[in-house]
Image (cartoon, grey):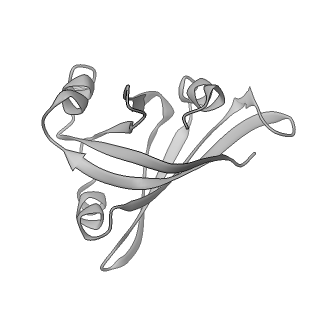
Amino acid sequence: MITEKLLEILKQDGVVAIATLGEDGPHLVNTWNSYIRISEEGRILIPAGYMNRTEANVAFNPAVLITVGSSKVQGLHGPGAGFLIKGNAAFITSGPDFDQLKSKFNWLRATLAVTPDAVTQTW
């Protein structure tokens, strides 16, 4: 489900948007392309330093939407490529997925682990 094009984008500078829905409505938080790692099982791993409202929303409703893109990667119609990722998320504070990110980002308090249901190239 994780394509080579998506992996190429994750190597570039760029902003990632993560949308959640909680009791108070939708919420959006950002991170950087280069912070994201992919587990051997295909989960998307994102370091969480704060993301407190995102965590509360995920506890209420684990569905997330993520957009990621780069102007430096060839897209469907020219320069620039992006993806929409739909999946279910969980915040984890121990285990291999947590340890993998903690070794690279000593500031993280948790790992946002997303199991993708759909990964669609949008541009």
Direction top: furthest residue: 103
Image coordinates for residue 12, horizontal then vertical, percent:
58, 25
Image coordinates for residue 61, horizontal then vertical, percent:
32, 68
Is 69 placed left or right of 36 in the picture?
right
In which quadrant will I find the C terminus? top right
Direction right: furthest residue: 77
Direction left: furthest residue: 94
Residue plotted at (66% across, 29% down): 5
Image coordinates for residue 58, horizontal then vertical, percent:
29, 62
Q: Quadrant of residue 13?
A: top right
Residue plotted at (32% across, 43% down): 113
Image coordinates for residue 64, horizontal then vertical, percent:
43, 59
Q: Quadrant of residue 52?
A: bottom left
75 in relation to 60, above or below: above
In which quadrant will I find the N terminus? top right
Q: Is residue 107 visible?
A: no
Is 122 placed left or right of 40 in the picture?
right
36 in relation to 25, above or below: above
Count of numbered tags: 0
Q: Is residue 56 visible?
A: yes
Near-viewer residue (18 or 91): 91
Residue plotted at (78% across, 35% down): 75
